Amino acid sequence: MSLEEVARTVETIEAEAEKVLEGARTKATEILLKAKEEADKILSSELPVAEVKIECEKTIHKAGEEADKKVEDSRRKASEIRANAERKLEEISQRIVRIITGADLK
C-alpha cells in the first residue's frame, strides 16, 4: 500500500469520524427542538402554571442530558476511529519498512 493510499485511508476515516460527530450534533439539535415543542405544548394546555414550568424544566433537562450523551458517544466513536487509523498507519509503515529493508524475504 503506497503512502498516498494510506493518506487517503486516513482521510476517509477522519471524514467518517466527522460524519459521526455531525450526526450527533444534528440528533442533539433535534432532541432539543422536540423538547421545546413538548414544552410549548405543555404551556398551551390548561394545567396550573407551576406544574407546567416544572414539567418544562424536566423535559428540557432530560433532552439536554440525552443530547450530551449522544455527543459524548459520538466523540468516543470518532476517537476510536482515529486510534484505529493511527494503529493501521503504523502497521502499514512498518510493513513498508520491512519490504524495503528485505525483512519479509526470510
Image (cartoon, grey):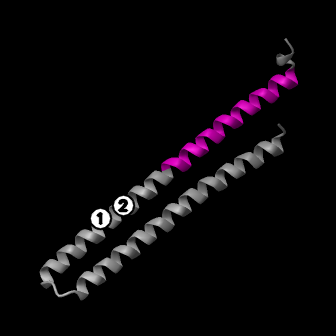
Q: Position of residue 56 (x, y in %)?
A: 24, 76
Amino acid tagged 2: Glu
Does residue 47 appear left or right of residue 104 in this picture? left
Which portion, as a residue range, is magenta? Answer: 76-101
Q: Position of residue 101 (x, y in %)?
A: 86, 21
Does residue 57 appear left or right of residue 77 in this picture? left
Does residue 98 appear left or right of residue 66 in this picture? right
The foreground one among 56 and 1 is 56
Q: Which quadrant holds the N terminus?
A: top right
Find residue 53 and report its image quarter. bottom left
Amino acid tagged 1: Lys
Dot 2: element = helix
The foreground one among 42 and 3 is 42
The foreground one among 2 and 51 is 51
Q: Which residue is mark 2?
A: 66
Find residue 54 and report its image quarter. bottom left
| Residue lying at 34% horizontally and 78% vertically, measured from the top left | 36
Main SS type for the magenta part?
Answer: helix
Taking the view exactly as shown, the residue that stands out farthest to the top is: 106
| Residue lying at 24% horizontally and 81% vertically, measured from the top left | 42
| Residue lying at 29% horizontally and 83% vertically, measured from the top left | 41
Q: Assess whether residue 89 is covered by the magenta stretch.
A: yes
| Neighbourhood count class around disc 1 (C-alpha, 10 Å): few under 14, some 14–19, many 20 upward | some
| Neighbourhood count class around disc 2 (C-alpha, 10 Å): few under 14, some 14–19, many 20 upward | some
| Residue lying at 39% horizontally and 56% vertically, measured from the top left | 69
Dot 1: element = helix
Kindly report the distance in space between the C-alpha atoms of the residues bearing marks 2 and 1.
6 Å
Tell me whether circle 2 and circle 1 mark residues in contact (CB < 8 Å). yes
The foreground one among 27 and 93 is 27
Does residue 19 appear left or right of residue 63 in this picture? right
Q: Which residue is mark 1?
A: 62
